[in-house]
Image (spheres, helix red, strand yellow):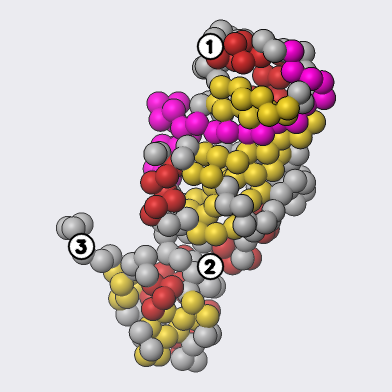
Amino acid sequence: MSAGKVPMARLDRLLANLGYGSRREVNALVRDGRVVLDGVALKDAGAKVPVSPDLPARMTISGKPVDPPAPLTILMHKPLGVVCSHKEAGRSVYELLPHRWRARMPGLSTIGRLDKETSGLLLITDDGPLLHRVISPRSHVAKRYRATLDRPLGGDEAAVFAAGTLMLEGEADALAPAVLEPLSPTEAYLTITEGRYHQVRRMFAAVGNHVTALHRDRIGGLSLPDDLEPGAWRVLDEAGLAAIFA
């Protein structure tokens, strides 16, 4: 695609992929005059329409802005008590999004996971290349966690984590160096560049401590906004996407 050229898509296919219903249901929306582009009700469900990032500002469905087209990336403040997988038991982060988004194609996936008892910054996307770039070990995207601990820090944890020699139980490879910033005797920031299973909790366990609360507040140069309440989310713009890799 040449620079500046806006991709086009059939209206019925576009809206079906955004979760607005089957092709037949989308045809009914169009027939009833409920799909409006640039102030004009569309009459042909097979018409080609421009799929640009500003589409929600130009198109409405039943009087409401159309959902953002792919590629879509969401920044969520994941609350405690919800899971990140479609397969895990319990309420999932996807249930915090509009119901029709579960029918979007391509589907939405979390970029990495936070366990049920961890809160904080979570990215959800339908952009496969972005997902793989963020989680790839080659990208070295840092993730910062605020950990509350059962017992006071001993004083040598920062050196142990920074050495790049710490082994987790059941694993054959040492962890990459990590940065510990004590905040109080029982609180600290821990910044890691990997995403191993329950890594932060297991790191503190390896030095004889136990994490009682865990919250992620940063991925790369992207921070969790102070005004984003638990369970709330917002669509990430180009500046936000760039901040991840800053």
- Give the residue type that dot 2 points to: Gly
Residue ID for mark 3 = 4
Mark 1, secondary structure of its residue: loop
Mark 3, secondary structure of its residue: loop
CA distance separating discs 2 and 3:
27 Å
Segment tinted magenta in the rendering: 128-154
Camera-side residue of 89 and 155: 155
CA distance separating discs 1 and 2:
46 Å
Which quarter of the figure has residue 180?
top right
Which quarter of the figure has residue 192?
top right
Of marks 3 and 1, the one in the foreground: 1
Of marks 2 and 3, the one in the foreground: 3
Q: Position of residue 42 (x, y in %)?
A: 38, 87
Instruction: Identify the image quadrant of the N terminus.
Output: bottom left
Q: Tell me if I can see residue 83 in this picture.
A: yes
Q: Marks 3 and 2: in contact by CB < 8 Å? A: no
CA distance separating discs 3 and 1:
46 Å
Q: Is residue 197 above or below residue 109?
A: above
Residue 164: image tag: 1
Q: Is residue 234 above or below residue 132?
A: below
Residue sitting at x 68%, y 38%: 215
Of marks 1 and 2, the one in the foreground: 1
Q: Position of residue 186 (x, y in %)?
A: 77, 26
Residue furthest toward the left? 2
